[in-house]
Image (spheres, coloured by chain):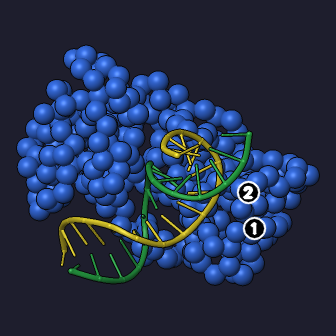
Chain colours: A blue, B yellow, C green
Amino acid sequence: MPEIAEVETVRNVLKKQILNKKIVDVDILYPKMIESNVKDFKKDLINKSFIDIKRKGKWLIFELEDRYLLSHLRMEGKYFIKDKKEAIAKHEHIIFTFEDEQTLRYHDTRKFGRMNLIKKEDLENTQCIKKQGLEPLDDQLTASYLLAKFKNKKLPIKTVLLDQTIISGLGNIYANEVLFYAQINPLKKALELTKEECAKIVEGCRQIIKQAIEMGGTTIKSYTSSLGVTGRFQQKLKVHKKEGQKCVKCGSLIKKIKIGGRSTYYCEVCQK
DNA sequence: AGTGCGACCCGAACGC
DNA sequence: TGCGTTCGGGTCGCAC
């Protein structure tokens, strides 16, 4: 399940592979994942090339000469580079062919990922990009910012950390880890957090996301980024998927509960 | 406006 | 073994 660190890893790997090569064909095997007009999608990409790859939260932003291709991997989306001659594998839904006979293939077992091709000038007005909050590593992400955002949020802090309009890019894994770092109970209402606790969350986001990006992300279940790069951050996880195991701090057993329908892992002794 | 929840998907895990 | 059922997870859209 790719979160910000995985998306950043995919971005870095793909940048080395596909920039400035002319796209000569686009195969759309699962049209439903294209949010923009499907016919225009192919027409507008052919004879263009990706000149840069950016990222906003969990959205990958492929820059072309006159458009942006927005791509969200959701839980299981992956990109692979393969030779044009290789047979189409199961779950490959979109295939971009370059003039050098290499292909970029979007693979997604659950078909949850989405792509959207937009005009360059529309980027800031496109809903999915516009509403993203601050990145975990943004200097503007401060305790005061969080305190203000949490002011009238009665929901559990765990749920609020997943709200992309506040912090952009945190998913379930890192939300669990950040709350353990900050020693905050995931069920605590966001509006009850003190400024000190908000400061801990900011610190936790920075530490954890920075380290996760350095380590190439977290490989959980089926997720590996493109080209066989395997995230190693899972070795650093302290609570996520650790139910029944001993807390690294106090030795009591990690609990698993549901908050807002999402699996939440925490130490009820350390996270009061 | 804030909140809660089903829908979208399909492979894995589970139950019998 | 084999079948049917349940679960999960990011985001959207609808209902309250």
Amino acid bearing label 2:
Glu
Q: Give the amino acid at mark 1.
A: Leu
Q: A212 left or right of A222?
A: left
Relative depth, front residue between A72 and A244: A244
Q: Is residue C16 above or below residue A234?
A: below
The 10 Å Cα crowd at callout 2, few under 14, some 14 to 19, many 20 or more, is many
**Residue that mark 2 sits on:** A92
> Residue A195 falls in which quadrant of the image?
top left
A137 displayed left or right of A53? left
Q: Which residue is mark 1?
A: A29
> Could you tell me residue A157's position as x and y percent?
21, 49
- Contact check, label 1 and label 2, Cβ < 8 Å: yes
* Occupied quadrant, residue A61: bottom right
Q: Residue furthest right?
A: A85
What percent of the width, then of the height, locates residue C2?
72, 48
Q: Is residue A130 left or right of residue A102?
A: left
Decide: is A66 above or below A76: below
Residue A216 position (above or below residue A134): above
Pinpoint the chain carrying mark 1: A
Residue pictured at 35% horizontal, 30% vertical: A243
Quadrant housing residue A229: top right
Q: Could you classify mark 1 by the number of other residues whose Cα lies within 10 Å: few (under 14), some (14-19), or many (20 or more)?
A: few
- Which chain is disc 2 placed on? A
Q: Is residue A122 above or below residue C9?
A: below
